[in-house]
């Protein structure tokens, strides 16, 4: 799949932002007034900024409003509905914490749950796609949600939770990579099924279906070398997990170590999410004699 920058920004930033909102919703950290304002401002900037960046990937951004009406069948629509509900309810909770210096526990709890559910719906947009075997696996929603929860823990100063959580994230990410490498081959999709000519025997590509590029090739087919992917995987794990865990283990509650932990984790997640899209192999690539 084409690793579009707007979609990568959307999934990374909104995931981190909603993770922050989830922790703030359960009173972690327990602060009010201007301190609460700063945390809520960052959380909303990440959440809303990520959601807005996704609109740049739409052919006609005005049509994004129509997505809310398809919540019965569309995970994209469910994501939009959950995101709006989470932001509205957490906005009410934020008003109480900032202006009235009180925590409305029930409202915050509901907002926290909706924040996590929003991230889950985002993950299911990809996990539901049987046409992309790498994504159609339980590791996709687990990884999206765990990155959101533990990334939010880091951003809200939950050092112990974040430190051990990142170890879990690293294990899930490694499992996702190594179990997905052969998933396309074992999915049953072949050039015979792609062309519908399998009933007459073995099929091989003589010429591509098109002499030029088209939307499907641009969006659905992207090829990355195995050596480059392996190097980027290692770099992603080091930045996303290893360095933050080391910083947190050295006491990164505040100061330079905390900044290094946050920045390293964020860059690592961007690298991991870029690979998530770049390594995805859509079955439509078989029709064009390509995989990626």
Image (spheres, helix red, strand yellow):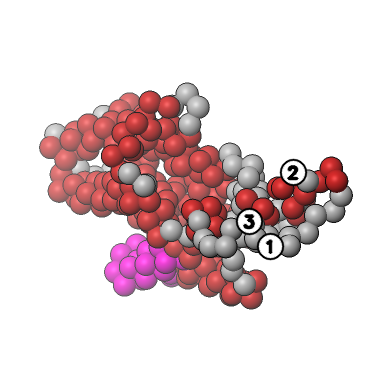
| Closer to the camera in the image, 118 or 228 | 228
| Label 2 with label 3: CB-CB less than 8 Å | no
| Closer to the camera in the image, 12 or 252 | 12
- Residue 237, horizontal then vertical, whole percent: 54, 67
Report whether residue 269 is seen.
no
Q: Where is mark 1, residue-wise? A: 207
Give the mark, 1 or 2, whose residue is nearer the N terminus.
2
Q: Quadrant of the C terminus?
A: bottom right
Task: Determine the residue located farthest toward the left in the rendered image.
Answer: 99
Q: Nearer the viewer, mark 1 or mark 2?
A: 1
Q: Where is mark 3, residue-wise? A: 209
Residue at 85 percent across and 53 percent down: it is 202
Residue at 57 percent across and 62 percent down: it is 211
Disc 1/disc 2 C-alpha distance (Å)? 16 Å
Disc 2/disc 3 C-alpha distance (Å)? 14 Å
- Check residue 263 for magenta coloring: yes
Name the secondary structure under disc 1. Answer: loop
Q: Where is mark 2, residue-wise? A: 196
Q: Is residue 177 left or right of residue 260?
A: right
Q: Is residue 85 left or right of residue 179?
A: left
- Residue 50, horizontal then vertical, whole percent: 33, 50
Disc 1/disc 3 C-alpha distance (Å)? 6 Å
Magenta-drawn segment: 247-268
| Label 1 with label 3: CB-CB less than 8 Å | yes
């Amino acid at each position: 799949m084409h690793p579009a920058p707007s979609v990568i920004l959307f999934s990374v930033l909104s995931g981190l932002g909603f993770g922050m909102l989830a922790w703030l919703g359960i009173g972690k950290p327990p602060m009010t007034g201007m301190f609460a304002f700063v945390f809520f401002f960052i959380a909303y900037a990440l959440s809303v900024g990520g959601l807005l960046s996704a609109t740049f990937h739409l052919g006609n951004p005005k049509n994004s409003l129509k997505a809310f009406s398809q919540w019965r069948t569309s995970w994209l629509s469910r994501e939009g509905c959950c995101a709006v509900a989470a932001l509205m309810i957490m906005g009410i909770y934020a008003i109480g914490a900032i202006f009235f210096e009180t925590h409305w526990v029930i409202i915050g709890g509901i907002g926290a749950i909706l924040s996590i559910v929003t991230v889950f719906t985002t993950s299911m947009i990809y996990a539901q796609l049987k046409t992309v075997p790498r994504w159609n696996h339980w590791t996709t929603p687990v990884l999206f949600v765990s990155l959101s929860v533990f990334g939010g823990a880091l951003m809200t100063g939950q050092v112990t939770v974040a430190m051990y959580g990142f170890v879990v994230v690293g294990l899930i990410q490694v499992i996702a990579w190594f179990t997905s490498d052969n998933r396309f081959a074992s999915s049953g999709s072949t050039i015979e099924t792609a062309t519908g000519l399998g009933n007459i025997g073995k099929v091989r590509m003589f010429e591509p279906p098109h002499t030029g590029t088209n939307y499907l090739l641009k969006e659905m087919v992207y090829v990355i070398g195995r050596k480059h992917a392996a190097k980027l995987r290692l770099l992603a794990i080091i930045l996303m997990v290893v360095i933050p865990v080391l910083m947190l283990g050295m006491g990164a509650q505040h100061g330079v170590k905390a900044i290094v932990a946050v920045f390293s984790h964020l860059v690592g997640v961007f690298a991991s999410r870029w690979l998530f899209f770049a390594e995805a192999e859509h079955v439509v690539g078989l029709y064009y004699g390509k995989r990626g």
